[in-house]
């Protein structure tokens, strides 16, 4: 071990508990992270470099610990570890191995799927929304602070020790590539907060889905030395979206930027429109930036409209609620025209809202689909309500299986009815109506 703390070092947490250093897990710009033994099992310890162990940073850490923020999508500071040989730190949970960093995604070293990426984006939006709703600004949203499970889309937000109460001017302003233009320009009165977080969040979502930065087009290629002055011009003084509809001077280069051209073309129009607003009007007016609720609704709708190509099996985004086959939209993988499967239209209890869920093989309905204003989305088995299953002895015939604890009332298109108990399946037919209980209803539509 070559870090600041040796293996076996014992430290005393402010609560009085003693912890022991096991090994070093990694290092970053502000400090090092260690695995430590505690009475509750192994934890992670962030230990600041002496140059970063300022009274100001100590105050931020103490404030975050005192908030006792409980959200499993964050590795939140749990306990303050006082000064020892010129520095201090805090305890947090260990990051499970299944969570991977975004650099590996950008280098195409991870196998993932369109659904998993959309789920990760949705969960990321909700995580920061939960933080903002408590009056806390993150200030350093970037690719280095979010980890995701490429199989499920589950996310973990790490390095939460720069978050502060909204309006607090202390600490850092963020990472240049993700900073709001007004912060890059150092405008008088501009300070990091929830409004600048919204810009950083939009950049992160774009990179998640497009594998490219939204402001890096032909203009960046013309820069011979991407030093700080050049970055300030690119991200602050003269930022321009690579897909700006009114100015194509920063458009992607067909040879150098083939990836973003392909991923943009494969994206749903609902997401493209939000990105356009974020990186046109939103670059200049913080008040019109896309809110978390808008991202959340669009990402859920697009995620629920993903379908597999019948020719190659790759997952494709389609437009939510679109009633007709997208005859002009080819699969991004093989070019075959997509054929849309039936969709399930779910109507929630008041205030009534419609959810449109495409029904490809193994499609699922989750508990949040039955809520008009879900506090949190969950695509795991724990919240499963229904799923599309294939008949065990009749390939090609499908039904909707009841995975809830309620008995549904079903009405076929001919007016006949039946009860579908937990574990039972009703044949998939256009016009089938289902009473899912508590005011939630669903109807199967052919397209």
Image (cartoon, helix red, strand yellow):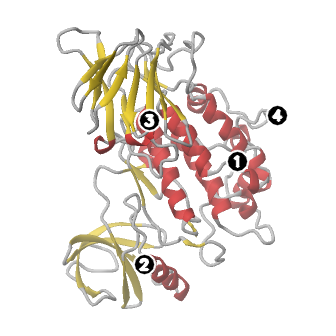
Between the residue at mark 2 and the residue at mark 3, the CA separation in whole angstroms equals 40 Å
In this view, 16 is above or below 238: below
Decide if residue 145 is on the left or right side of residue 150: right
Q: Position of residue 161 (x, y in %)?
A: 48, 72
Q: Nearer the viewer, mark 2 or mark 1?
A: 2
Reply above or below: 200 against 295. below
Q: Which residue is mark 2?
A: 65
Residue topped by disc 4: 246
Residue at image position (28%, 41%) is: 381
Disc 2 from disc 1: Cα separation: 45 Å
Q: x, y (%) of residue 17?
A: 24, 86
Look at the numbered disc 4 and give the secondary structure of its residue: loop
Element type where label 3 sits in the image = strand
Residue 28 visible to an observer of this rendering: yes
Between residues 390 and 58, which one lies in front from this camera angle? 390
Which residue lies under the disc numbered 1? 224
Q: CA distance from mark 4 to mark 2?
A: 47 Å
Q: Earlier in the sequence, mark 2 or mark 3?
A: 2
Q: Disc 1 to disc 4, how far (Cα)?
A: 26 Å
Extreme residue in the front direction: 416
Q: Nearer the viewer, mark 1 or mark 4?
A: 4
Numbered tag placed on residue 440 in the rendering: 3
Which one is closest to the eye, mark 4 or mark 2?
2
Question: Which comes before the other along the chain, label 4 or label 3?
Answer: 4
Q: Earlier in the sequence, mark 2 or mark 1?
A: 2
Q: Which label sits in the foreground, 1 or 3?
A: 3
**Quadrant of res 6:** bottom left
Q: Do labels 1 and 4 touch, CB within 8 Å?
A: no
For this rendering, which residue is in front, 146 or 85? 146
Q: Earlier in the sequence, mark 4 or mark 2?
A: 2
Q: Earlier in the sequence, mark 1 or mark 3?
A: 1
Q: Please identify the quarter of the rendering in which residue 393 is found.
A: top left
């Amino acid at each position: 071990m070559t870090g600041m703390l040796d293996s076996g070092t014992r430290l005393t947490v402010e609560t009085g508990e003693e912890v022991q250093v096991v090994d070093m897990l990694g290092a970053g710009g502000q400090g090092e992270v260690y695995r430590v033994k505690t009475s509750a099992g192994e934890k992670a310890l962030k230990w600041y470099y002496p140059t970063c162990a300022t009274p100001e940073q100590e105050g931020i850490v103490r404030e975050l610990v005192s908030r006792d923020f409980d959200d499993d999508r964050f590795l939140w500071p749990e306990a303050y570890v006082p000064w020892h040989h010129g520095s201090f730190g805090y305890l947090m949970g260990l990051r499970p191995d299944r969570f991977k960093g975004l650099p590996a995604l950008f280098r195409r070293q991870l196998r993932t799927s369109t659904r998993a990426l959309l789920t990760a984006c949705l969960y990321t939006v909700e995580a920061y929304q939960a933080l903002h709703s408590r009056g806390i600004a993150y200030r350093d949203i970037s690719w280095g602070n979010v980890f995701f499970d490429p199989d499920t889309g589950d996310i973990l937000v790490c390095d939460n020790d720069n978050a502060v109460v909204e309006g607090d001017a202390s600490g850092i302003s963020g990472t240049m590539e993700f900073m709001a233009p007004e912060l890059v320009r150092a405008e008088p009165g501009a300070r990091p907060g929830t409004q600048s977080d919204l810009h950083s969040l939009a950049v992160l979502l774009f990179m998640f889905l497009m594998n490219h930065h939204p402001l890096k087009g032909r203009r960046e290629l013309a820069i011979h030395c991407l030093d700080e002055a050049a970055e300030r011009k690119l991200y602050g003084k003269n930022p321009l979206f690579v897909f700006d509809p009114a100015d194509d001077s920063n458009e992607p280069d067909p040879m150098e930027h083939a990836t973003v051209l392909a991923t943009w073309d494969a994206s749903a129009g609902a997401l493209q429109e939000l990105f356009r607003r974020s990186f046109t009007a939103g670059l200049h007016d913080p008040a019109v930036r896309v809110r978390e609720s808008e991202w959340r609704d669009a990402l859920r709708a697009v995620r629920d409209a993903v379908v597999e190509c019948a020719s190659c099996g790759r997952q494709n985004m389609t437009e939510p609620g679109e009633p007709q086959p997208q005859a002009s939209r080819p699969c991004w993988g093989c070019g075959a025209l997509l054929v849309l499967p039936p969709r399930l239209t779910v109507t929630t209890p008041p205030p009534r809202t419609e959810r449109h869920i495409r029904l490809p093989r193994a499609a699922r309905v989750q508990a949040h689909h039955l809520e008009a204003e879900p506090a949190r989305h969950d695509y795991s088995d724990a919240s499963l309500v229904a799923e599309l299953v294939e008949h065990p002895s009749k390939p090609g015939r499908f039904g909707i299986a009841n995975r809830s604890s309620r008995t549904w009332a079903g009405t076929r298109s001919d007016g006949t009815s039946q009860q579908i108990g937990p574990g039972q399946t009703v044949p998939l037919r256009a016009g089938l109506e289902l009473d899912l209980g508590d005011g939630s209803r669903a109807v199967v539509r052919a397209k």
